[in-house]
Amino acid sequence: MNDIEKLIDQETESSEEDRDAPIPAGATLSRPNRARSAVYSIRLDPDEVIALQTIAEAAGLPSSTLARSWIVGRIREEQTGFNGSVRIPRIIRLPAPRSGPEEGDIGYLAKLSRIA
């Protein structure tokens, strides 16, 4: 176990010992998604889930954050005709298959990423 892992273990133990302690005066609490009041469930095919996770991982984002940003961006485009941002180039480029995409192959994931 390296020094960082030891420190993390010590801090974890310390925080668990004081888990019911009052929040110190002057501490700032942050709940950035508290204003979002609704959870919306959608159904995706397994290949769509894989594609979303692959693209999100390449972007360094949780897949739910990426999906939410796509949805919010599209809502803004529908409401205003323009989302006000510069188009970001594709994060990953997947080769298209020669014979056409099929479920489970990398070309299918590329096709799904172009839909967004």
Image: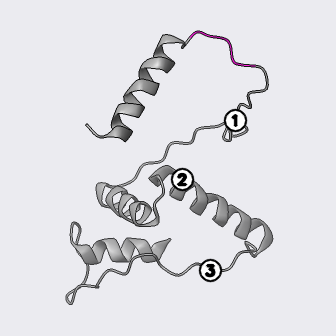
Residue 58 spot, x, y in % from top left: 40, 66
Label 2 element class: helix
> Rounded to the nearest whole Å, what is the CA distance between mark 2 and mark 1?
18 Å
Residue type pointed to by label 1: Ser
Along the line of sight, which residue is nearer the eye, 116 or 62?
62
For the residue carrying disc 3, how many other residues have a C-alpha within 10 Å: few (<14), some (14-19), or many (20+)?
few
Name the outermost residue toward the front: 3
How far separated are the C-alphas under marks 3 and 1?
30 Å
Could you tell me residue 111's position as x and y percent? 36, 77
Q: Is residue 87 left or right of residue 96?
A: right
Label 2 sits on what residue type? Thr
Residue 69, compared with residue 77, is above or below; it is above
Q: Is 12 included in the stretch rendered in magenta?
A: no
Mark 1 burial class by Cα count in 10 Å: few <14, some 14-19, many 20+: few
Comparing labels 3 and 1, the label whose residue is closer to the camera? 1
Q: Disc 2 designates what residue?
A: 65
Instruction: Count every numbered label the image shows and give the total.
Output: 3
**Where, by quadrant of the figure, is residue 100 drawn?**
bottom left
Secondary structure at numbered mark 1: loop
Q: Which residue does the numbered mark 3 point to in the structure image?
A: 87
35 or 96, which lies in front? 35
Give the side of residue 35 with respect to residue 12, left or right: right
Q: Is residue 40 left or right of residue 4?
A: right
Tag 3 secondary structure: loop
Q: Residue furthest bottom?
A: 98
> Disc 2 vs disc 1: which is toward the camera?
1
Q: Are marks 2 and 3 in contact (CB under 8 Å)?
A: no
**Earlier along the polypeptide chain: callout 2 or callout 1?**
1
Q: Which residue is mark 1?
A: 30
> Marks 1 and 3: in contact by CB < 8 Å?
no
Nearest to N terminus: mark 2 or mark 3 = 2
Q: Which residues are magenta?
A: 20-24
